[in-house]
Image: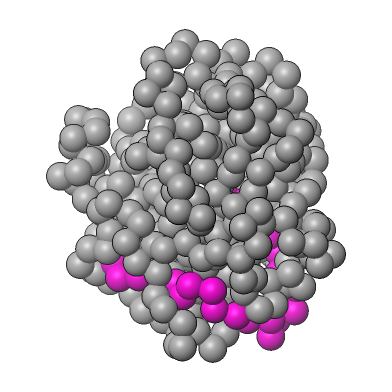
């Protein structure tokens, strides 16, 4: 399989000192992360935004790496990174660290109109904790377009954001992507190469993935999809993705029993977000938590905030008072706690009640 050029900042998170957190959660650590990219094509599904083509995906996989020093550092895929304090920490094609046995698999999808690399800081943090993290772009709806490992490029559909039914189109496509990617990962564990370019697979990746323990998280639409994803997903985290079900594809069915953690930004309108979450979840019997991250705005849940000048070109409106590194430390801690609990069976007190370590979080 081919390797994606460009990731940044991998680490297992240690608590930062106070809400302003002078330390960064992107500092180097002894836990390197490897990265590779699969080029997948679904022969049974047309792309809704390009019906003449089969659905094509660039799927980036991060994982804890072994013997990484002899492999090149990933660099350069994000327009705003690397920046000071956020150097690359993923190694292209490095072997998987299999010393802990098989690893849980967590899927990641970005927000509507966004690219998967916007969540790299969170993705690498989770990989450094011992997860195989699988990120998917929504082809034709990813910011700046999608680069594929064979070198070709698919631009963003300029009409995507202008369409009244863009969320319906994207949510249907993403639901299909989740199931298809899980099928391809399953094939990989059986020794079948699903990559259409037949690149070099990082050593140990096929045997490392435990597809009996699958989670999903995402931002905005990507977070909402964790509620509607394939039944093989055992737990989900929705980061500021309160979206009315009427805006999504009507064929989607929410899993009422899947454990779900919802985190809303407290710097925007959490009351409105809460009301929308009620429409999404109703009286679902499954384990459900709603948290509010104080002072966080919508873009506090991705990496765009690391370049405020660039962000202002895209969307005016400010950043809120939450320090970006501190925000990521808090988000990463709760995402990890969710999957450690439901995929690894560990008791995680962070999920039970407010924590003095993370006073920015309130329980809804």
The image position of residue 276, as x and y in percent, is: 53, 21
User: Residue extending furthest top?
Assistant: 164
Left-right relation of 187 to 3: right
The image position of residue 177, as x and y in percent, is: 66, 39
The residue lying toward the viewer, choosing from 211 and 359, is 211
Can you say whether 115 is above or below 323 in the image?
above
The residue lying toward the viewer, choosing from 295 and 88, is 88
Q: Tell me the quarter of the picture where residue 285 sits.
A: top right
Q: How many marks?
A: 0
The residue lying toward the viewer, choosing from 332 and 44, is 44
Can you say whether 210 is above or below 42 in the image?
below
Residue at screen point 66% across, 43% down:
41
Residue 89 in magenta? yes
The residue lying toward the viewer, choosing from 186 and 210, is 186
> Can the viewer see residue 339 in this picture?
no
The image position of residue 75, as x and y in percent, is: 34, 66
> Can the viewer see residue 38 in this picture?
yes
User: Residue extending furthest right?
Assistant: 190
Residue at screen point 19% across, 43% down:
310
Residue 245 in magenta? no
Residue at screen point 45% across, 53% down:
151
The image position of residue 3, as x and y in percent, is: 51, 65
Left-right relation of 42 to 13: right
User: What range is drawn magenta here?
Assistant: 86-108
């Amino acid at each position: 399989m081919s390797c994606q050029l460009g990731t940044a900042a991998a680490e297992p998170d240690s608590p930062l000192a106070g809400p302003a957190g002078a330390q960064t959660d992107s500092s180097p650590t002894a836990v390197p992360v490897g990265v590779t990219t699969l080029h997948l094509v679904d022969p049974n599904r047309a792309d809704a935004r390009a019906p003449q083509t089969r659905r094509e995906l660039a799927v980036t996989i991060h994982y804890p790496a072994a013997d990484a020093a002899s492999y090149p550092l990933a660099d350069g895929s994000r327009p705003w990174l690397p920046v000071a304090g956020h150097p690359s920490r993923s190694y292209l094609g490095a072997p998987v660290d299999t010393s802990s046995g098989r690893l849980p698999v967590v899927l990641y999808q970005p927000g509507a109109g966004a690219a998967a690399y916007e969540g790299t800081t969170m993705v690498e943090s989770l990989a450094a904790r011992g997860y195989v993290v699988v990120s998917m772009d929504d082809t034709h709806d990813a910011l700046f377009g999608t680069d594929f490992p064979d070198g070709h490029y698919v631009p963003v559909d300029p009409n995507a954001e202008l369409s009244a039914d863009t969320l319906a189109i994207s949510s249907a496509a993403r639901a299909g992507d989740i199931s298809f990617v899980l099928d391809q990962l399953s094939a990989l564990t059986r020794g079948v190469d699903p990559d259409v370019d037949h690149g070099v697979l990082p050593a140990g990746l096929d045997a490392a993935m435990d597809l009996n323990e699958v989670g999903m998280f995402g931002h905005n639409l990507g977070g909402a999809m964790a509620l509607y994803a394939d039944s093989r997903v055992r737990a989900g985290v929705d980061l500021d993705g309160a979206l009315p079900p009427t805006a999504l594809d009507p064929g989607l069915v929410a899993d009422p029993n899947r454990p779900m953690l919802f985190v809303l930004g407290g710097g925007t309108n959490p009351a409105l977000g809460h009301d929308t979450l009620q429409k999404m979840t109703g009286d679902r019997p499954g384990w459900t938590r709603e948290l509010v991250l104080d002072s966080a705005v919508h873009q506090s849940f991705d990496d765009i905030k690391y370049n405020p000048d660039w962000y202002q070109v895209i969307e005016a409106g400010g950043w809120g008072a939450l320090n970006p590194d501190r925000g990521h430390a808090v988000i990463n801690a709760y995402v990890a706690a969710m999957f450690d609990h439901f995929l690894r069976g560990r008791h995680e007190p962070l999920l039970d009640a407010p924590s003095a370590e993370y006073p920015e979080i309130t329980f809804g």
